[in-house]
Image (tube, coloured by chain):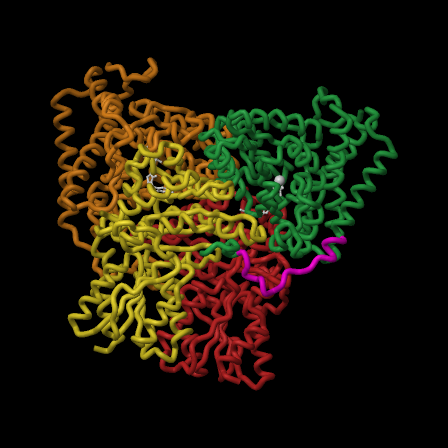
Chain colours: A green, B orange, C yellow, D red
Amino acid sequence: MTTVPATPATTPAVPDAAHARDLLRDMLRIRRFEERCAELYQAEKIRGFLHLYIGEEAVATGVMRALTPDDSVVATYREHGHALVRGVPARAIMAEMFGKATGCSGGRGGSMHLFDTARRFYGGNAIVGGGLPLAVGLALADRMLGRRSVTACFFGDGAVAEGTFHESLNLASLWGLPVLFCCENNLYAMGTALVRAQAQVDFTTKAAGYRIAAHAVDGMDVDQVAAASRDAVATVRAGDGPMLLEFRTYRFRAHSMFDPELYRTREEVDAWKARCPITTYEARLRAAGVIDDAAKATLEAEVGREVEDAVAFAESSPWESVDTLTRHVYSEPEPGHAT
Amino acid sequence: MTTVPATPATTPAVPDAAHARDLLRDMLRIRRFEERCAELYQAEKIRGFLHLYIGEEAVATGVMRALTPDDSVVATYREHGHALVRGVPARAIMAEMFGKATGCSGGRGGSMHLFDTARRFYGGNAIVGGGLPLAVGLALADRMLGRRSVTACFFGDGAVAEGTFHESLNLASLWGLPVLFCCENNLYAMGTALVRAQAQVDFTTKAAGYRIAAHAVDGMDVDQVAAASRDAVATVRAGDGPMLLEFRTYRFRAHSMFDPELYRTREEVDAWKARCPITTYEARLRAAGVIDDAAKATLEAEVGREVEDAVAFAESSPWESVDTLTRHVYSEPEPGHAT
Amino acid sequence: MTYREAVREAIRKALRADPRAFLMGEDVGRYGGCYAVSQGLLDEFGPERIRDTPLSEAAFVGAGIGAALGGMRPIVEVMTVNFSLLALDQVVNNAATLLHMSGGQCHVPLVIRMATGAGRQVAAQHSHNFDGWYAHVPGLTVLAPATIEDAHGMLLAAMHHPDPVILFEHVLLYASEGQLPDGADAVSITSAVVRRGGSDITLIAWGGMLARTLAAADQLQAAGISAEVVDVRVLRPLDDETITTSVRRTHRALIVDEEWRSGSLSAEIATRIAEHAFYDLDAPVGRVCSAEVPMPYPRHLEQAALPQADTIAAAARAIVGR
Amino acid sequence: MTYREAVREAIRKALRADPRAFLMGEDVGRYGGCYAVSQGLLDEFGPERIRDTPLSEAAFVGAGIGAALGGMRPIVEVMTVNFSLLALDQVVNNAATLLHMSGGQCHVPLVIRMATGAGRQVAAQHSHNFDGWYAHVPGLTVLAPATIEDAHGMLLAAMHHPDPVILFEHVLLYASEGQLPDGADAVSITSAVVRRGGSDITLIAWGGMLARTLAAADQLQAAGISAEVVDVRVLRPLDDETITTSVRRTHRALIVDEEWRSGSLSAEIATRIAEHAFYDLDAPVGRVCSAEVPMPYPRHLEQAALPQADTIAAAARAIVGR
Ligand SMILES: Cc1ncc(C[n+]2csc(CCOP(=O)(O)OP(=O)(O)O)c2C)c(N)n1
Ligand SMILES: Cc1ncc(C[n+]2csc(CCOP(=O)(O)OP(=O)(O)O)c2C)c(N)n1
Ligand SMILES: [Mg+2]
Ligand SMILES: [Mg+2]
């Protein structure tokens, strides 16, 4: 097994082969999907802001594994991976990024605003910290309606400085609501290093200020993410109130497509790339005999097909007609229902 | 010496007699001033919202003692006491509450917006939590201009739930700014008990989330307030960054003049009244031989004269002319200075 | 019955009728509401459905949005519009936007009630009126009930609306008295209403300004001028039809708006009148608004800053020319 | 030189001229500014004066206000106007209000710069334009420089202003090129300016809409219509004089405003024109504004939502009647 820096010696043994392969597949799906997105951005098929998750795939992959279809997800503008592993079809996501009518948000949202209520995927929020209150409300609804669902709420280290973080964690804890707060700490908010944004960089200390249990998790190790998430979701689902997991991870690419990356060194990026969640996990699975060259090739082929199918679908999908410009500003009367 | 519940055995001995008498006098000045305000509210001389500080006098009195004239103060809408012991003349405060032109805010602000920049008293802020960012900025200016001043920022327990609390404490600590955060924890925000507003009622735990040193102080004991404030101001002034003091206190009166007080019991109020900061301190000084009946009578007379003088001044002061309605929306050109 | 009681009655009916409905906000429970609107409701519905919140406007408004997404029918009380700026991002960027941004998937059936307006000498930070700001936002429906019946019926109607509704309750109205007709139910939340017929000029007002505009109409009547009074009551979407129809008949209009004049809703209404009835106008549309000043505390200055029956009547007479 | 460089140059001059001046905001330092405005300034002035902040809009805008009270001359960059809603309470209730509320004691010489506007396919939460909202607030001065010279000179002028100034920099302008005259200095922050003379109609625009309005004027010229173009550039207080003078001469006016139509600044301008020049108008004042929809992502919908040279020209022709 390759050694991953800062990973405790007690890395859990690979649990079961099918499960492990699924985790690897999901991470790979995100990676290949987003690599293709970057190309499509250069080709001007995708426009606006594009925030890649490359390097952080273990986090969404591990957390989503712990959720059931009845659970809810709230994410940020860096959410392609989350949508994909939550089960939103790659076609619908890619079409959305093209701005096509067949996109998961009807083409209105684009990269930053992926939605799929059937999968309880509530965005795609591009105001930093703006999703946290929504997650509290979704959990409140679950509680009041007697549903035993959990709401997983993703946000970055940068969001921790926002007032909504504070207000939302307090509210969730005060009311004992089933929210799993998932902080994706990739050490930067755009170009601002964590140490230049936070007086206290240990987020578990912050959680204590709300009487919320919190753990820091190696976000580059999908097994650890999955294990920590499974335990946390179980606790939250049991009604013991919210929890916070801080996933220590790193974004390999620029913040968005316009970022000259003046704020970090090549060396730092390379050191983290050496901990790539996919290559390290693949190596672990190979060492454990769970996959081999052939299996990997099959996996890559499958993933490649999914991505290319999504691109073809997006390409061939129609645009929304301009006549519909002001649709969905207000709800449309339900068929057969007088207003 | 009378025992004050929850006061540690190590209550500092009364330091020096003049100092002690000054503290008693300041608390009494607040009490008598505000008792008169309540009457004047009934008499419809004072209008709008009126938030009395009665019961909490030890806090402002003790903190202000620790400040120099170069320090700054930011307070809330419950700030008559703060203004008074900061040195804003009782006349100017009372005139302000009457809405007269001679008021410390020219009559524009009223009870909730007392200002006096000559004494570096920056309000009088009536948006809960709204003053904290201002305090951070005042401290930032002091630091950037090389002044060794401290900014004391007062706010209630209710404000702790606001996003600005979180953002401001982080910013002050991150930048190592000389702010003394003074939380006046009177256990209620209007009718909402602290336990129904805060998942974590130990505010020192919260401060740790910003790497800010914090202490809880018996806010009913002016000696303890003064001692804790002296130490904290010295630390902050030395450049060790901000501190938080949580003063445990209680408001004896209604939240404002419209409050039916459905949310707390007579017994609870009476138990706290038994800890009145003035009567307990007076008893302590009497026991220590620092004051006697005659001294107390003199004190009351002096204070009474100050209050009545302020009322007479306010009464006889002129109203602002209606012609000036839109003055002070923009700065007026300085005399002899072209715009 | 008071306006305050009418609102309370509507909340009670809404909570009785729909188990998904609940009220949340600062001091709505044990305190009974800052303006005593919800007094007694905690006893009837309990703390889950009459839910006191901490001082966290952004979070509890956002939680209301999330709860609406999750299938509830929240009524969120923001104590006053002054504090709503702290939650404005949630209202604009989530409540009003989610439906469109999600391609029609995310419905937000949320009612936000706020006390609004000046007149109680609570000075610059507690006297705002942001009617026009909220009415600017696509996706919102914005209501300003001025009568007992509307206070009751608009809230009931809002509870059946599939999208976010902002309800402004003017602080000066809470104590006003009136009759709630037997069997009073939901009222229209799409149309303005003519409160008084007249032929010489149309006075246009809503919310806290309606009563003094009606008083001005009385004064005008005494001076031989017949003023029609339109209560806008739905600030978004505006009912152009009712307003234009009236102005086409009277040929003159005066708008009374408690907001600071520049950029207030009065400007939108005036502009629309000009757009729809320019050639019917015998004079430019007039406006009586508040002085452009953070509200001063003393009564004489506050009253001078606000539209008054006298100033409204005087402005109307100047337009009519007698 | 680009608009971006012109703003940078003004910041540099301001910081060199006054030791109390500093720049603070998200990513203004090491990142070089979200729109690269402040690139290089960190090296020249160091991290105390080019101050990166955490994501805490309310706190750092409020800290800017406090620092101004304390004797500094802060320039606060709010990355985009979209995020400024999080700080709006501080702007309205403190920056704009402290002077009045304190009876003239608390001056807040603060400059807040924000990127604004749509057109880059960044969808509903990143495409706002709140020109009219800020222009509604007494105590603020609101500027919208549309040219290189104004981008530079208005910022310099703002630095000498004793009260809070909001500066809107439209995202589409940053890359625009132009000449900054030798010795360019502060420009007026009280007056609008006629950018092109004409006699048949007055087109009124500012900020991001100016260029396409000038393009529309070219189109109109080709069709034999002589359009005057007024660049409002000071959104508060509005320069009625320049606008009214032009309209009195052309008898027709069309306002181009990137905001959602209802309740936009265009309404205030239209209303004032009617108030000041009603009897000079040959037609109702026209408006071309954005569609009332949270901005959709795809280019064809975004462009359809926004005013365009073609739609402006067409609206002008409809007013002129040829
Ligand atoms: C309220 C707000 N302020 C600023 C921005 C601009 N912005 C977008 S992403 C970002 C950095 C966020 O960092 P973090 O939360 O750590 O998430 P990451 O991008 O690292 O995943 C900033 C400043 C925004 N979208 N919303
Ligand atoms: C942002 C905001 N929300 C609500 C209010 C209404 N309000 C005024 S005082 C108050 C209670 C504040 O409690 P706390 O901070 O504990 O101070 P205390 O009044 O107890 O001194 C409330 C809710 C306000 N002024 N500002
Ligand atoms: Mg980050
Ligand atoms: Mg309190």
Q: Tell me where residue B104 appears, x and y as whole percent.
A: 26, 47
Q: Is residue A244 left or right of residue C247?
A: right
* Membership of A316 in magenta stretch: yes
Which residue is outermost to the bottom?
D224
Which residue is located at x 38 percent, y 49 percent?
A: D94
Q: Is residue D158 above or below residue C125?
A: below
The residue sitting at 22% across, 51% down in the picture is C179
- Residue B132, given in percent of the width and then of the height, sits at 41, 40
Extent of the magenta region? A312-328
Q: Give the quadrant of the N terminus of chain D.
A: bottom right
Seen in the picture, residue C292 relative to B199 is either above or below; the reply is: below
Asked if residue A281 is among those painted magenta in the image, a careful observer would answer no
Front residue (pair B1, D128): D128
Q: Is residue A96 left or right of residue D106?
A: right
Q: State left or right for residue C222 relative to residue B172.
A: left
Work out whether residue B44 or residue D158 is closer to the camera in this orientation and state it.
Answer: B44
Establish if C313 lies above or below C78. Answer: below
Question: Depth check: C195 or B17 in front?
Answer: C195
Q: Specify the farthest residue to the right.
A: A294
Residue D173 at x, y = what percent? Answer: 59, 63
